[in-house]
């Protein structure tokens, strides 16, 4: 590479040093040489300057450097401008005809017309997309950064140099920035000066400030209208000329300045800093062009993928779909289950699959369809795109992508600039001095980040972005080369999806970091490691494939089904000029590279597993974790041992060896031999039975190969898991012998009485007493069957032919299936053991235990794990060494010993039962077991029973591991919601199982009104039949032993119900928590977890309400403690929740956005749901291991028939990337966030409203209840209803209108409404989610599924009606709504209204804008069902109509052809879609071929020819076909000729359009350049204003942040201050209350004591009175006293009540007065504050208005002044234009005169031509007469030549006969010589064997036959690499191979013996053969017959004369 090209390539490459490489923070302005020396040295070397920056010591050296750079700056800048100039495609300009084809720097802009047809959507990161959406929504860009970014686009290099020089001066001595003078803040910096700089630019005039009319002190701003500008004129003499002489500049450029000037002198700017600025400016521009090249490359790749994926062709300049998408892996846009077909697939129109395939590729037949792929070249370090015509092109979408990228980068850089608050503190002395000079407390330079070098930020942005794009391109090239090797449509689409994801991948910015450089570099490291991993894997795959093809094609590639033979002669690069993978040869394809699509999926799965384990806090930690994962993956791939190395040598030979079974030719030979044997045996069978037997035979062979493949996979996985199990057992504290089971032969087994005894409940018991464990540890691993049997069932071998033939027997094949079963069971056992130990790790954070619980639950997508919970193969994790290596040692050491599973102890009971059964069967069967086949049969049966018992036993551990994993995930989720966890859940404690009380069982559910009981601390009862508390989360120590004392079947049943409950509960909680976070859009731009959720989306209150509702639903179940009913209820609630979210997002939100015209939100949500919603549904997800193992069409993996016919393939095609791995349940929040990640805050409110609307609609559905939908039709007339009622009354059951649909198959007989006597429906009782949960959820699920189906049919109907690919804009959606309302919805509502007696409400027409309301009482389900039925009928009618059209067209063509007369050809049958013109061609008459064929079988007599009738008919048929074929080709040629003529005219029109487009582009480019220049000039003149704006923005943001936290801080501070006082008040109040209570008790005690004393005294007094005996009686006196006392007491009570009432009234009056005073004072205060605010606002408004008036007037003054000057310049320009116009008119007049004279000359020339034509006509007549004479002579010659030919034919036959005799003799001699060679070769082969040569080589020499024809032998030697047919046997494939490999040396002996030079000894027989051959050849010399014939013809001609 030349030095200049190398320099350009280096400058175009991304990466390099950061501007602040030492700290990697925001770069600051640095001008001293020592600080910029590394960057300057890097740039100097990058651009190829031969200078040593380290040797620069003085100012003269610096200026010498600057002078060198300055000389080349303009040249480089001009070259960059050429590369940025894109001409319009197909627009030829004079002098630029070769633009776009001459050099890569000259490119043409091309339209991106494939964008509307893109179906592949990229998968994004929701967190990053959400943050970028927030930045774009704010759209806050640093103004100085924006201006400097625009400055990069300036086209004038001189302006750039001047600006850089001024920038350097400003950096060295920055100006003091003052705020602009306004009315409220007067400063010396007046706004008039700004307008003066902007509009008049005083630098262009002389310094005449005293004569300037714009001087502020010379006029009043309010009198701006009266200012006169007539006296102002431009002074050219005062203009500052650039070419004026500057002494200081000249001295610096010459290097004569030693730097002795003062530091304040601007002329003393260092040359090194100027050089650095210039080179940095060039570098930024080069990096931008590099980014554009890569983005253009990505768009070109996207075009290729779109054309291949959608079948597009370019016709008339527009992309057009040439064939429908036909992918097995459908796009689940409509919410379906994906899969092939769908409503958009109309395969029924085609007669056969072949016709459909032809229709797919029909768009590639014609040359004018420009759907060719682009070509890519690398030049000057950049990738360039060339189209099929060889032009360098740049797509317009790539240019737009660059603009969008630039905008995003500026937003990111602005975020980091504003985020850095450390720069607001002064760092240098000059900064402190400037800060002291600024008046006030607002430092503009500090807040504006004046010290930040924004050019350096741009440099860092573009250098790192270019490096990132280059790394991404390198990775994409690897995948793209694999894409070009793949031909399968589904695998090709998978790779296309991977490439699409990679093209749109963006760096994951850590917005909490200080700068973005570290993020970019880590992302680049990850991409490079990913590319290395992919390259290693694919190179290894290509190497293996080459060995395989070499082995297969050693005998040629002519057989059907074999790959093409590799011809190693011309290495090519598939994509780029340099291959990303290994170089391949021409016609070398490796379809197995489709495995590349599985690599990103596997890495993604492993990444998310690590993420949920380690939970990184920041984005940087996430990237570091991914980098470590990739490091580990690369190391594992490099160190990965061969498959099966841990097994015994015999197992490696029998199973893993590829000596025989991996050779397809050997297997084909076995198949042929078996088929021959079968033919011999069944020779007398009918042909049909023979075919059946042949199919069965091939099926057995394929089954044997498939079982071997599965057995190898299972053995390999078991090998990896065994290593993990050993390591795990040692970590827990057990030995590795628990993995192995000692082999016991069936024949030597003894009966055991305790067989079947399970191992101990607590595995830790064997640590104390391990006598029951066998300490057997073998040296190697064995297969699972070899632990049970080796002699009969376990014996097999794939190494030899005999072994494979033995396996092909039916019994041996059954043995092999049993071997596979035992190995799979053993592998699943290992998986369950390892998984159980892994999930029992201690939690990262200790959780408080013992809180109260109430209710709660949530929902998820893990229905697959719950539905397959009872299958033993579905609950394990894949053995992943990556995850085990990344697990920390501390977590490994903390495993619970109870989690250990001893495989030996688990196998022993089942093994003992199997041996006891064998002994029993042996005694029973007796002599029958003498037959070995019966023994094998018995052992197979016993081994199957063993596998079932053992798997049932191990399924318990798998179920426990799933339960514990769900609870661990639930606990991890609840850590983010501690209030929910503490309120609604109960957490178990370690080893709590032994501390359970009686109340923790069923007894705890018995209600006790006297006591407040807590819920039981169990989920299920001990017997597993009663649900106690679903809100209890047990510790894993309890989950390990629960239900363990039950029988195995009962234990599995209890664990299964437990798993179903916890899975549904976990998923519901996941959904609720994720839903509550959807509205949290105000979170920080970091990656830390949000500490709050949005109340708009429910918040924690909504979660609690949902959980309480779940408990109420459980309480209202019929069997509220039944595990089955509760599991069903929770599962149905989960399904309904996810269906509700799917429907809301997929249909409601998108329709709302389209109806409101928010197309951006619609496109964003459509792109995001492409991956998010399928991940939340039950869509089949294929395994990573099912490459080319799909279920055959038309089956799908989910079909029951497919599961029955292809169980293994359907299993791996529907159960996720790892079928035996836990589903990633934690991804629910990730996928839900992805759906709405690209929405703005306003759009999120709309989304929330749509979700709420769907919820309300579902409530309405519940209110309406069930309805009979079996008889629903699109239109219900009265007669139809009567007929239906009659038929129902006769048959007793309703007949479904559409029996083939799933809607009619549903059980609609239950809870259906009844019909009354009048034919009207009786309303059904409404349903309640709380009272009837299961019935409600069934109805809601039915409604949501119906809604989804309706939307899918609506979309298909609308696309068909509007003839569009997709309804994706508001105009199309509006038209669709109008059409749908008119044709579908309104007729259905009319029908429903008539049914409900409301038909008069829907009479007449409705307007397009008027909404349609459903009739009162009508159900939403009924209306949607009727719409669906009508749409189905419409689709069926369309399908029938299309088929009828096709049949009618074909029948018409057929009838037309039959009735066609002989006048024209059937051109209608031959027309292609590309042919638009047609014409009629007369039918020609052809007889030569007909006569030739007719005379081949004819009898000739003297007078007549005789031929057979059938021969004549066949000749006629061949004649007709030949004629029609020829005419068809002619028709196609002529039609395409005329099509080309039309295309030429279209091309001319297209060129005119391109010219117009180019003019528009030039105008737009000129406007952009002008805008950039104006903005840069404005920025230069108003730099201070921009800095002030930037500072004000930062200050406003800071004040806003302070204001947001100020109120909260004040409340907290006041709360802290008054908290102690409030506590004291409460304490005092409680003390007073206690004292009052004591006083009351004392008072009551005193009163009672006084009463007792008074009573005793009264009694004594009464006794004394009685003793006196006088006065009234005792009773009268007592009654009188009592009455008086009662009166006194009543008076006292009344007095007391009045006193109390008076006190209350006083208190009330006091409270009213106080309250009134407070209210009045508050209102007065508020009124005063309002008045103050109004006054303040009035003053502010007045000041702002005055300021705006002043600004407008100043602007008007400046504008008028500028306008006056521009008007004078305009008048001068008009004069110049008038002069030029006159000159142009004179030139045009002269041109017209010249044209007139030219026309006169043409007329004269035409007259001369007419004379010449007349003369030619006369000569032509003479020629005709001569030609007639010549025709007569030629007839005579023809007659003579016929005679001569007959004689020559006779002679030729004679000579041929003689030559045949001689050839026979020659062949006989050759055969004799061959026999001699065979004898000698046999002797030679024995000699070779004695020398040590391989036998295969000897046999290849021996088996080579001698050819009878030397020519054939020579052709064969040229066509193959050797005579033996082996191409080349062992070949080493180096990375860089020679262009012409050695053909002769196909075998290399270890001792370098060249076999080709060994010759046979000469014998006499050889000389004899040579003499005989020479003699025969000499005799074969035939005379020249042609010369003889010519002599005879001459003689005949002479005789005629």
Image (cartoon, rainbow, N blue to C red):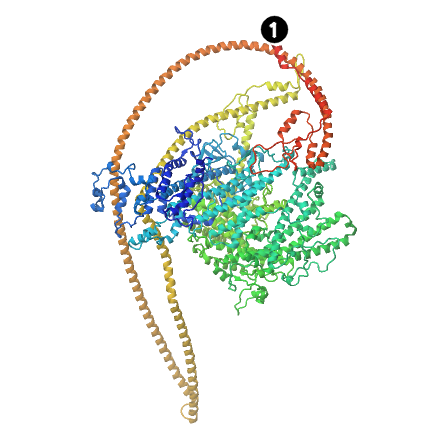
The relative height of residue 1176 versus residue 1821 in the rendered view (above or below) is: below
Residue 936 % position (x, y): 73, 48
Viewer-closest of 643 and 1844: 643
User: Which residue is labeled 1 in the image?
Assistant: 1999
| Residue at point 65%, 52% (across, down) | 826
Q: In which quarter of the image is the C terminus?
A: top right
Q: Among all residues in the image, which is located at the extreme bottom?
A: 1668
What residue occupies the far right of the structure in this picture?
Answer: 927
- Across and down, in percent, residue 1450 comes to 55, 30
Q: Which element is circle 1 on?
A: helix
- Where is residue 1206 shown, x and y percent of the image? 62, 44
Can residue 375 be seen here? The reply is yes
Q: Nearer the viewer, residue 1337 or 1873?
A: 1873
Say whether residue 344 is left or right of residue 1642. Answer: right
Q: How many marks?
A: 1
**In the rendered image, the vertical position of residue 1827 relative to residue 1589, given as above or below:** above
Residue closest to the eye, 1095 or 616: 616
Which of 334/1270 is in front?
334
* Residue 1267, visible in the rendered structure: no
Q: Relative to 185, is 1359 above or below?
A: above
How packed mark 1 is, by other alpha carbons closer than 10 Å (few <14, some 14-19, many 20 or more), is few
Q: Is residue 1620 left or right of residue 308?
A: left
Residue 293 x, y percent position in the rendering: 45, 38
């Amino acid at each position: 590479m030349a030095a200049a090209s190398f320099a350009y390539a280096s400058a175009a490459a991304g990466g390099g040093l950061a501007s602040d490489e030492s700290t990697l923070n925001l770069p600051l302005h640095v001008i001293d040489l020592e600080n910029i020396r590394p960057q300057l040295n890097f740039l100097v070397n990058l651009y190829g300057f031969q200078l040593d920056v380290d040797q620069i010591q003085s100012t003269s050296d610096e200026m010498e450097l600057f002078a060198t750079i300055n000389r080349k700056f303009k040249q480089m800048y001009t070259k960059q401008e050429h590369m940025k100039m894109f001409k319009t495609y197909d627009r030829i300009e004079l002098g630029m005809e070769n633009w776009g084809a001459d050099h890569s720097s000259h490119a043409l802009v091309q339209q991106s017309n494939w964008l509307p047809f893109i179906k592949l959507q990229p998968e994004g990161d929701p967190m990053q997309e959400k943050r970028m959406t927030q930045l774009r929504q704010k759209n806050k860009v640093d103004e100085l950064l924006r201006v400097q970014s625009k400055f990069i686009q300036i086209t004038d290099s001189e302006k750039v140099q001047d600006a850089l020089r001024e920038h350097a001066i400003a950096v060295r001595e920055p100006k003091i920035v003052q705020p602009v003078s306004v009315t409220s803040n007067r400063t010396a910096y007046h706004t008039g000066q700004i307008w003066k700089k902007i509009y008049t630019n005083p630098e262009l005039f002389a310094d005449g400030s005293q004569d300037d009319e714009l001087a502020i002190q010379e006029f009043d701003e309010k009198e701006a209208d009266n200012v006169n500008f007539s006296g102002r004129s431009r002074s050219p003499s005062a203009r500052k000329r650039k070419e004026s002489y500057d002494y200081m500049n000249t001295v610096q450029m010459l290097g004569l300045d030693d730097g002795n000037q003062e530091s304040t002198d601007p002329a003393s700017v260092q040359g090194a800093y100027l050089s650095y600025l210039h080179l940095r400016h060039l570098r930024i521009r080069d990096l931008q062009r590099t980014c554009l090249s890569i983005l253009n490359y990505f768009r070109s790749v996207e075009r290729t993928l779109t054309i291949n994926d959608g079948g597009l062709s370019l016709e008339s300049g527009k992309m057009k779909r040439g064939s429908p998408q036909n992918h097995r892996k459908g796009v689940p846009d409509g919410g379906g289950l994906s899969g092939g077909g769908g409503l958009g697939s109309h395969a029924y129109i085609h007669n056969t699959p072949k016709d459909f395939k032809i229709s797919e590729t029909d768009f590639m037949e014609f040359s004018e369809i420009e759907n060719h792929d682009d070509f890519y070249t690398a030049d000057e370090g950049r990738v360039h795109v060339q189209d099929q015509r060889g032009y360098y092109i740049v797509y317009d979408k790539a240019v737009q992508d660059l603009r969008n990228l630039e905008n995003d980068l500026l937003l990111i850089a602005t975020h980091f600039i504003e985020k850095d608050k450390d720069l607001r503190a002064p760092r240098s002395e000059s900064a402190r001095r400037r800060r002291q000079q600024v008046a006030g407390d607002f430092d503009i330079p500090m807040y504006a980040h004046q010290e930040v070098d924004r050019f350096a930020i741009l440099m860092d942005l573009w250098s790192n972005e270019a490096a990132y794009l280059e790394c991404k391109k390198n990775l994409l090239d690897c995948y793209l080369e694999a894409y070009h090797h793949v031909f399968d449509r589904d695998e090709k689409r998978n790779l296309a999806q991977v490439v699409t994801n990679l093209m749109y991948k963006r760096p994951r910015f850590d917005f909490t970091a200080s700068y973005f450089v570290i993020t970019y570099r880590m992302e680049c490291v990850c991409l490079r490691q990913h590319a290395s991993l992919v390259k290693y894997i694919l190179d290894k795959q290509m190497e293996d494939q080459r060995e395989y093809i070499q082995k297969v094609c050693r005998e040629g590639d002519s057989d059907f089904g074999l790959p093409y033979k590799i011809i190693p002669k011309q290495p090519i690069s598939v994509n780029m000029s340099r291959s990303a993978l290994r170089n391949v040869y021409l016609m070398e394809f490796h379809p197995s590279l489709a495995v590349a699509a599985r690599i990103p999926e596997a890495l993604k799965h492993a990444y998310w597993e690590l993420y949920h384990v380690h939970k990184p806090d920041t984005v940087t930690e996430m990237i570091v974790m991914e980098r470590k994962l990739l490091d580990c993956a690369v190391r594992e791939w490099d160190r990965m041992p061969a498959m099966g190395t841990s097994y015994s040598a015999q197992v490696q030979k029998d199973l893993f060896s590829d000596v025989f079974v991996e050779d397809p030719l050997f297997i084909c030979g076995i198949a042929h031999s078996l088929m021959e044997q079968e033919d011999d045996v069944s020779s007398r069978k009918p042909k049909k039975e023979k075919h059946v037997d042949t199919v069965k035979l091939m099926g057995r062979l394929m089954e044997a190969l498939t079982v071997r493949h599965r057995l190898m996979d299972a053995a390999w996985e078991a090998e990896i898991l065994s290593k993990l199990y050993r390591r795990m057992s040692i970590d827990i504290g057990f030995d590795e012998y628990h993995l192995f089971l000692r082999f016991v032969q069936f024949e030597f087994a003894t009966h055991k009485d305790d067989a079947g005894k399970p191992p101990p409940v607590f595995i830790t018991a064997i640590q104390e007493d391990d006598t029951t464990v066998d300490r057997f540890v073998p040296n190697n691993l064995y297969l699972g069957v070899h632990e049970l049997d080796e002699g009969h069932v376990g014996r097999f071998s794939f190494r030899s032919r005999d072994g494979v033939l033995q396996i092909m027997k039916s019994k041996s094949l059954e043995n092999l299936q049993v071997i596979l079963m035992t190995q799979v069971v053993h592998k699943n056992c290992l998986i369950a053991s390892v998984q159980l130990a892994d999930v029992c790790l201690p939690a990262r954070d200790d959780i408080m235990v013992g809180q109260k619980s109430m209710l709660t639950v949530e929902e998820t997508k893990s229905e697959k794990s719950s539905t397959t919970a009872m299958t033993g193969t579905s609950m394990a994790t894949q053995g992943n060494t990556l995850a085990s290596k990344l697990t920390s040692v501390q977590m490994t050491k903390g495993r619970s010993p109870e989690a250990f599973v001893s495989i030996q102890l688990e196998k022993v009971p089942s093994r003992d039962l199997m041996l006891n059964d064998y002994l029993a069967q042996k005694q029973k069967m007796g002599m029958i077991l003498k037959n070995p086949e019966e023994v094998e049969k018995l052992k197979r049966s016993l081994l199957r029973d063993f596998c079932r018992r053992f798997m049932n036993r191990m399924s318990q551990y798998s179920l426990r591991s799933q339960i514990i994993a769900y609870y661990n995930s639930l606990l991890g989720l609840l850590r983010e919601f501690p209030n929910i966890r503490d309120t609604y859940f109960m957490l178990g404690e370690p080893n709590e199982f032994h501390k359970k009380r009686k109340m923790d069982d069923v007894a705890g559910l018995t209600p006790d009104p006297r006591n407040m009981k807590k819920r039981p601390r169990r989920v299920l009862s001990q017997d597993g039949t009663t649900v106690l508390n679903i809100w209890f989360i047990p510790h894993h120590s309890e989950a390990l032993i629960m239900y363990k004392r039950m029988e195995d079947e009962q234990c599995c049943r209890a664990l299964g119900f437990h798993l179903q409950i916890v899975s549904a509960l976990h998923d519901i909680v996941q959904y609720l928590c994720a839903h509550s976070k959807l509205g949290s859009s105000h979170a920080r731009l970091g990656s830390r977890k949000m500490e709050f959720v949005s109340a708009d989306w429910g918040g924690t209150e909504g979660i609690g309400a949902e959980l309480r509702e779940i408990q109420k639903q459980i309480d209202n179940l019929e069997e509220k403690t039944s595990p089955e009913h509760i599991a069903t209820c929770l599962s149905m609630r989960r399904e309904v929740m996810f269906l509700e979210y799917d429907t809301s997002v997929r249909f409601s939100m998108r329709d709302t956005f389209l109806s409101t015209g928010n197309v951006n939100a619609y496109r964003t949500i459509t792109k995001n749901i492409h991956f998010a919603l399928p991940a939340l549904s039950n869509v089949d997800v294929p395994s990573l291991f099912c490459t080319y193992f799909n279920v055959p069409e038309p089956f799908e993996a989910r079909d029951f028939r497919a599961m029955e016919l292809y169980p293994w393939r359907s299993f791996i095609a529907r159960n996720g990337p790892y079928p035996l791995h836990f589903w990633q349940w934690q991804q629910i929040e990730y996928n839900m966030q992805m759906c709405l990640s690209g929405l703005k805050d306003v759009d999120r409110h709309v989304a929330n409203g749509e979700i709420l609307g769907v919820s309300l609609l579902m409530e309405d559905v519940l209110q309406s209840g069930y309805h009979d939908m079996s008889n629903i039709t699109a239109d219900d007339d009265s007669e139809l209803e009567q007929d239906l009622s009659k038929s129902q009354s006769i048959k007793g059951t309703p007949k479904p209108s559409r029996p083939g649909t799933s809607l009619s198959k549903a059980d609609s007989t239950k809870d259906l409404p009844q019909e009354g006597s009048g034919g009207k429906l009786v309303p059904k009782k409404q349903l309640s989610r709380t009272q009837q949960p299961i019935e409600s959820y069934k109805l809601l699920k039915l409604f949501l599924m119906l809604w989804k189906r309706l939307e899918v049919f609506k979309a298909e109907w609308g696309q068909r009606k509007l003839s569009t690919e997709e309804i994706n804009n508001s105009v199309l959606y509006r038209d669709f709504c109008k059409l749908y309302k008119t044709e579908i919805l309104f007729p259905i509502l009319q029908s429903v209204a008539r049914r409900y007696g409301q038909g008069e409400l829907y009479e007449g027409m409705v307007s397009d804008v008027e909404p349609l309301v459903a009739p009162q009482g009508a159900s939403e389900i009924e209306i949607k069902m009727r719409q669906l039925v009508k749409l189905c009928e419409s689709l069926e009618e369309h399908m029938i109509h299309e088929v009828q059209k096709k049949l009618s067209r074909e029948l018409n063509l057929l009838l037309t052809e039959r009735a066609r007369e002989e006048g024209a050809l059937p051109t209608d049958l031959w027309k292609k879609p590309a042919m638009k013109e047609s014409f009629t061609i007369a039918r020609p008459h052809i007889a030569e071929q007909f006569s030739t064929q007719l005379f081949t079988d004819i009898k000739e007599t003297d007078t007549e020819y005789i031929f057979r009738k059938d021969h004549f008919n066949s000749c006629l048929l061949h004649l007709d076909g030949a004629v029609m074929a020829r005419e068809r080709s002619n028709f196609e040629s002529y039609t395409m000729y005329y099509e080309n003529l039309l295309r030429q005219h279209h091309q001319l029109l297209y060129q005119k359009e391109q010219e117009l487009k180019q003019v528009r582009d030039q105008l737009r480019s000129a406007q952009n350049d002008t805008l950039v220049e104006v903005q840069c000039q404005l920025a230069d003149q108003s730099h201070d204003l921009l800095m002030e704006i930037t500072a004000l923005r930062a200050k406003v943001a800071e004040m806003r942040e302070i204001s947001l936290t100020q109120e909260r801080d004040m409340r907290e501070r006041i709360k802290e201050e008054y908290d102690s006082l409030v506590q004291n008040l409460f304490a005092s109040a409680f003390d007073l209350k206690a004292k009052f209570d004591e006083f009351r008790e004392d008072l009551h005690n005193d009163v009672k004591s006084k009463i007792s004393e008074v009573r005793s005294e009264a009694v004594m007094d009464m006794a004394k009175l009685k003793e006196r005996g006088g006065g009234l009686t005792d009773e009268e006196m007592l009654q009188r006293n009592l009455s008086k006392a009662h009166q006194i007491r009543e008076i006292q009570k009344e007095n007391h009540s009045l006193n109390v009432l008076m006190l209350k009234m006083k208190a009330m009056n006091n409270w009213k007065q106080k309250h009134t005073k407070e209210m009045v004072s508050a209102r007065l205060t508020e009124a005063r504050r309002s008045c103050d605010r109004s006054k303040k606002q009035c003053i502010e408004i007045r000041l702002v208005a005055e300021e705006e008036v002043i600004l407008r007037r100043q602007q008007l003054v400046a504008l008028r002044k500028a306008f006056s000057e521009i008007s004078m310049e305009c008048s001068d320009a008009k004069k110049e234009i008038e002069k030029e116009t006159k000159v142009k008119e004179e030139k045009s007049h002269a041109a017209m005169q010249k044209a007139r004279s030219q026309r006169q000359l043409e007329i004269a020339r035409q007259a001369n031509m007419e004379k010449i034509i007349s003369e030619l006509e006369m000569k032509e007549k003479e020629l005709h007469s001569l030609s007639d004479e010549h025709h007569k002579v030629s007839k005579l010659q023809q007659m003579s030549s016929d005679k001569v030919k007959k004689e020559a034919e006779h002679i030729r036959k004679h000579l041929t006969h003689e030559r045949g005799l001689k050839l026979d003799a020659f062949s006989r001699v050759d055969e004799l010589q061959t026999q001699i060679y065979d004898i000698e070769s046999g002797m030679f082969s024995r000699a070779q064997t004695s020398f040590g040569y391989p036998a295969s080589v000897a046999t290849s020499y021996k088996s080579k036959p001698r050819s009878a024809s030397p020519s054939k032998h020579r052709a064969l030697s040229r066509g193959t690499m050797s005579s033996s047919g082996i191409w080349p046997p062992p070949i080493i494939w180096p990375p860089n191979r020679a262009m012409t490999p050695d053909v002769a040396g196909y075998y290399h002996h270890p001792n370098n013996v060249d076999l080709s030079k060994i010759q046979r000894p000469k014998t006499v027989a050889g000389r004899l053969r040579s003499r005989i051959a020479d003699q025969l050849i000499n005799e074969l010399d035939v005379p020249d017959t042609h010369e003889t014939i010519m002599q005879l013809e001459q003689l005949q001609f002479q005789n005629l004369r």
